[in-house]
Amino acid sequence: EHFASSRTELSRAVAALSAAVVLELNMSRSSCSVPTAAATVLASSAAAAHLAFLHVGSSQSPVQQTQRLRGGASSKAQSSGLAGGATTTGVFAAAMLASRVACRATAVKKKGVKVVEGKEIPWNLFSPKAPYQGKVVENDKHAHTLTSETGDANWETSHVTFDHGGNVPYIEGQSIGVIAPGPDKKGEQPARIRLYSIASSAVGDDQSSKTVSLCVKRVVEVDGEFANREVGEDKADKAGTHYPDNKVYRGVCSNHICDMTPGDDVLITGPTGAEMLLPEDPEANIIMLATGTGIAPMRSYTSLLFN
């Protein structure tokens, strides 16, 4: 009521109150669906709208206009004040606008969550610059190496389990990233992250909700187009495979994972991925095609559906 009637000062007042609405909602960390700061939002929005409706070119002073809007000037003013008409519409519109702005601000601030088809799922809780350091643990359901030697350089597939202490929650169909020490093809150390489909259900193979398992095929190419080991440089891996008489390319992260032993540290990012989530409908028919993904996500699904 005591602001000067200049357009600039009114604009500043409205902007300040609008900012207060956003700040209050952010500080309260309320959700858009059930805002605990609703009273503050509406009160501040109404105040902002009230100031905005003061007419700069009016012959009345701001105080007189305020009294008129509140219905204190005359019976005519009372019949067209905040109880109805254009002023009520304006206050409501301003309140709605401020609420929408506040909701957007809240959504931006909520880290580690992505909304997919109305459902919140864990999302990128840990980044390549700030990964989670987990531990490799022994899996009591599967041997480390799942496959038998066939003579093919790519014969080995490993089942590896990491303890994340409950800090990397995920759901079936998602992936995590693993950061290998490197160097990678480009000589980077540590190597860039590699994404791997999760092979365990959300509770983990041990059903503690503190572990995550991967099913990783060891990448080994002999005398191929690329090589990161010249003749005589290839050393035996954990499974005992080596090709000292050939040029060999070994996948940086797949070999890092397949050579892990219980107690080793592992750098984890994520979780991520919303393309392969199971449908909400429990009666849905599901056709699984492991083209490119391998069996890992299929194992995650079946662990949930049949166990």
Image (cartoon, helix red, strand yellow):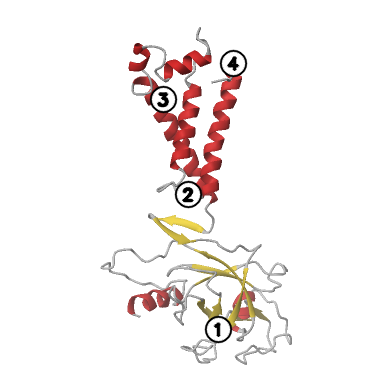
Of pointers 4 and 2, the one earlier in the residue sequence = 4
State how far apart marks 3 and 2 are (Cα).
Answer: 25 Å
Kindly state the secondary structure of the residue where label 2 is placed: loop
Q: Is residue 200 above or below residue 49?
A: below
Alpha-carbon distance for marks 4 and 3?
20 Å
On residue 90, the disc is 3
Looking at marks 4 and 3 on the same chain, the residue that comes earlier in the sequence is marked by: 4
User: Label 4's element?
Assistant: loop
Quadrant in which residue 132 is drawn: bottom right
Q: Which mark is residue 9?
A: none
**Residue tagged 2:** 30
Do callouts 4 and 2 mark residues in contact (Cβ within 8 Å)? no
Picture residue at 49% right of the left edge, 41% below the top: 102
Which numbered disc, 1 or 3, marks the residue closer to the eye? 3
- Pointers 1 and 3 in contact (C-beta within 8 Å): no
Q: Secondary structure at mark 3?
A: helix
Q: Residue at x 47, y 18 (%)?
A: 66
- Dot 4: within a 10 Å radius of its alpha carbon, few (fewer than 14), some, or many (20 or more) residues? few
Q: Which mark is residue 6?
A: 4
